[in-house]
Amino acid sequence: MGSLYLLRHGQASFGQTDYDALSPQGQEQARILGQALQQRGIRFHRALQGSMLRHQQTAKFCLAEMADAPPLQTDERWNEFDHQAIMKALHPDFENPEQVQAFLKSSKDPARAFHKEFEKAMQRWMSGTRDEDYTETWQQFKQRCADALQSLLKTADPSENILVFTSGGPISGLMGLSLELSDAAILRLNGAIVNASITRLPFKEHQLFVAFFNDYAHFEKTSSSLLTHR
C-alpha cells in the first residue's frame, strides 16, 4: 500500500503586501518539517507541489533537510482557493490593501478578527447561493482537488510514498472526500490545520484511506511559537 503525505505550507506573510511568501517563521517550520521527515526513515519516491510561492518555498526548505530528497514536480491543481477573492466578495472594500490594513489595525486581535470575517466569507462561498460572484466556485474547487488526486493515483505505483506540498483547502477537501464529510465539517477541519503539518492518506488502487491528520508533533519539541495556523 502506498501513501500520500500531504504537507501544508509554512506560515505565510499574514498582513503583509505579499501574503504568498513564507515568513521567517514559516521558513523555519519548513526546515523542521524536513528534518522530521528525514528522521522517520521513510523512502519518498517523488514529490509534488502547487505552483504558489508558499508551496515552492516550503518544498525548497523542507527538501534541503532530507539526505535523499525525491524529484519534485509542479501541478497547479494543488493550489489553494483564492482567499482574497472570497474575502472581497463579502467585503468589496478589501480590494484596496490599505482598507485591509486599516481593518487589521482597528482590531485588538487582528488575526482573530480576520478569521471571523474569513469564516463568514467561506460560508458564503460554500453555500453555492452566489456562485456568479466567484471565478472558481466551491464545487469547482472540490472537483479540481479530486482531479489532482485521481491524476496522481493513476500514475502511482502501489507502494509509492509521495510528498505533496499544498495548502489547507486541498488537504481538508480530500479529507472530506475520503470520509464523506459535510461542507461544514470540511470548513472546521480547514481551520484546524497547522502550518507545516503532515496528513497521511494511504491508498490502494484508487481508494483512499486516512492514517492520520494534521500531525505537528515535530513542533512540540521546539518553541510553541512555531504552532501557527495562517
Image (tube, grey):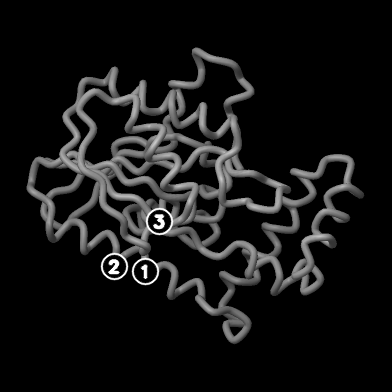
- What amino acid does circle 3 point to? Gly
Q: Is residue 185 left or right of residue 209?
A: right
In this figure, which residue is indicated by the disc labeled 1? 144
Residue 111 location, x and y as percent? 75, 43
Identify the element where label 3 is drawn.
Answer: helix
Q: Residue 99 occupies which quadrant of the picture?
A: bottom right
Q: Is residue 5 left or right of residue 114?
A: left
- Residue drawn at the location 44% of the way across and 21% of the way down: 218
Query: Looking at the figure, which quarter contains the N terminus?
Result: top left
In this figure, which residue is indicated by the disc labeled 2? 147
Identify the element where label 1 is drawn.
Answer: helix
Choose the circle earlier in sequence order: 3 or 2. Answer: 2
Q: Residues within 10 Å of mark 2 (few under 14, many from 20)?
A: some
In this figure, which residue is indicated by the disc labeled 3? 176
- Residue drawn at the location 36% of the way across and 64% of the way down: 77
Measured in 3D between alpha carbons, the distance from the residue under mark 2 to the one under mark 1, in whole angstroms, is: 5 Å
Choose the circle earlier in sequence order: 3 or 1. Answer: 1
The answer to whether mark 3 and mark 2 are in CB contact below 8 A is no
Identify the element where label 2 is drawn.
Answer: helix
- Residue drawn at the location 57% of the way across and 82% of the way down: 131
Q: Is residue 136 above or below residue 72?
A: below
The answer to whether mark 2 and mark 1 are in CB contact below 8 A is yes
